[in-house]
Image (cartoon, rainbow, N blue to C red):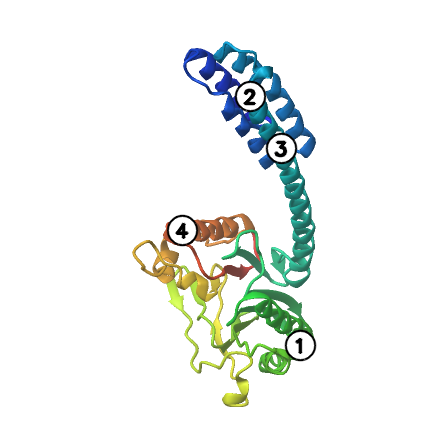
Amino acid sequence: MTPVRLPLLILLVVAVADVGTGQDTVFYPFLILCPALAALTATPRAVVLVGLVCFPVRYLLSRYDHPEEPLTSSVFLANSAVFLVAIVLCAYQARLRIRRETTLADVTSVALAAQEVLLPTLPSTVGGVRISMRYFAAAAEARIGGDLYAAVDTPFGTRILIADVCGKGLGAVRTASLVLSAFREAALDDPDLATVAHRADTNVSRFSDDGDFVTALLVEVHPTHLALLHRGHVAPILVGPSGVRDLDPPAPGLPLGLGQLGPEADTPWTTAFHPGEVLVLVTDGVLEARDANGAFYPLHDRLGVLMDPPDPDHAWGQGNLDRAADRIGADLLGHAHGKARNDDAVVMLITRTGPA
């Protein structure tokens, strides 16, 4: 719909209603709606033009409704003066609206650029693994909050991070940047996954002004197995031909930023990772999504239905993996329908590369 189509439609409706109901009714004062509605979508010049189009219509309708000449009526002239002032005010409001929209567009452009720098879109393939990820922001139009992720191809295997800042607002974004910068640097240099986690932990404890801490899970993909390091995050889930299996850590670790409160050494644990299996990583926004009755999202139970093997050989091509991620995302949003989400949510599916 063009910006002035609705105001002109209102003008037509008022004119037809006034003439159609006879001379006993007066509708032309409602023409004030035309410039007011135009101010919501049109430019100031268009608002003024709509108002000027209304003037002769007002005159003709007044001439139809009253026996006297409208230009000799003090009531009509007073109403016309008020109408003219309203046009000026509506045009001014349209100017302010356009200025705010321009400012918002500039700020949004800068924010999107910052989002892409901090959390660039993950490639579908990193090293020897295939990845499909979906991010569901609690704030409309946002893609950065307290949830963060990264994947790096290193000499020690493909290293993956998924984490969640215990905090809100810009402080959480700043803490997320501390974790990501430490991980991206250390993942390429340090052969020990525990050292990578320690460097991220140190970054948060030293430089986070708000006292935020970060739950995190670090994954290192090897040819035959996974090495995982738990720092207070949601446990990963492995989905394969044998079913759905939670990978609970044997020794849960403290979140990043709180490492000084526990044992100095982190202990990764390993598990087999066979072709055809998919590692499912999520943030707590997934598990804490509630339906209209307050029930949490049953991720473990739903994965068996949503991630049926794509073929008898259990080969996960990128298309199959993306479709599985879409199904999980749609199911999650459907579960939370009717209740606003108050936390970001990330779903990441990881499998080995192979024939599609």
Q: Earlier in the sequence, mark 3 or mark 1?
A: 3
Callout in the foreground (4, 3): 3
Callout 3: SS: helix
Q: CA distance from mark 4 to mark 3?
A: 53 Å
**Foreground of the two, 235 or 247:** 235
Callout 1: SS: helix
Q: Is residue 195 above or below residue 52?
A: below
Labelled disc at residue 85: 3
Question: What residue sits right under mark 1 in the picture?
Answer: 186
18 with respect to 203 (left or right): left
Residue type marked 3: Val
Callout 4: SS: helix
**Foreground of the two, 188 or 81:** 81
Question: What residue sits right under mark 2 in the picture?
Answer: 76
Labelled disc at residue 341: none
Q: CA distance from mark 3 to mark 1?
A: 65 Å
**Foreground of the two, 321 or 314:** 321
Callout in the foreground (2, 3): 2
Residue type marked 4: Asp
